[in-house]
Image: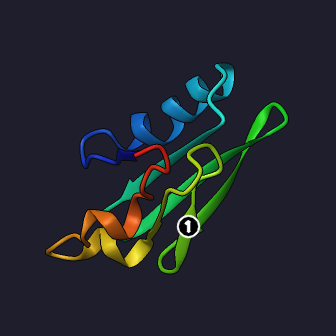
Amino acid sequence: MEVISKEGRGRDTLDNREKYERSDVREYWLVDPERRELNVFRRKGWRFAEERLSRGRVESVILPGFWLEVEWLWRRRPPRTERTVPRSSKG
C-alpha cells in the first residue's frame, strides 16, 4: 500500500505502475488522499487492472483475510486492529 504524495503524483501513479508491471508484483493499493480514493491494482496477464474505490470493502487477493473499509482511510481514528487482521489459528 502506498500513498500518493502531492509532490510525486506522476511518479507515484505512472512510474511506479510501469515499474511494478515489469516486475512480478501481483497486487498493490494506492491511496489518493486528494481525491479520497483507493486505487487497487491487480495483475491480469502482463498488465494491471485498476479499480477505483471511494467507499466499500476491499479484500486483498495476496494476503488472505486482510481487508478494509475504504472509508476508514479518512477517519481521524483508525479502527481497532482486531477488526481487520485475522487471528492466527496456530496461536
Give the image quarter of residue 12: top left
The residue that label 1 is drawn on is: 58
As drawn, which residue projects farthest toward the top? 23
Instruction: Name the side, left or right, on which 19 lies relative to 3.
Output: right
Report the residue at 64% width, 62% height from top.
Answer: 51
Asked where in the image residue 23 lies, by quadrant, the reply is top right
Please, is residue 88 above or below residue 58 in the view? above
Q: Tell me the colour scheme of the image.
A: rainbow
**Is there any visible trace of residue 34 in the rendered image?**
no
Identify which residue is drawn at 58% across, 62% down. Answer: 59
Residue 74 pos. (x, y %): 27, 73
Q: How would you rate the neighbour count of disc 1 (Cα within 10 Å): few for under 14, some for 14-19, many for 20 or more?
A: some
* Residue toward you, 8 or 17: 17
Residue type for callout 1: Val
Which residue is nearer to you in this view: 85 or 11?
A: 85
User: Which secondary structure, mark 1?
Assistant: strand
Residue shown at 40%/58% (left/top)?
Answer: 85
Query: Which quarter of the rendered picture does the N terminus lie within?
Result: top left
Q: Is residue 75 left or right of residue 8?
A: left
Q: Is residue 5 left or right of residue 16?
A: left
In this view, 78 is above or below 18 = below
User: Residue 45: where, in percent of width, then height?
Assistant: 85, 35
Q: Residue at 26% x, 72% y: name it.
A: 79
The answer to whether any part of residue 66 appears in the image is yes
Q: Residue furthest right?
A: 45
The correct choice, above or below, for 14 with respect to 63 in the image is above
Residue extending farthest to the front is: 91
Image coordinates for residue 24, horizontal then vertical, percent: 66, 22
Count of all numbered marks drawn on residues in the image: 1
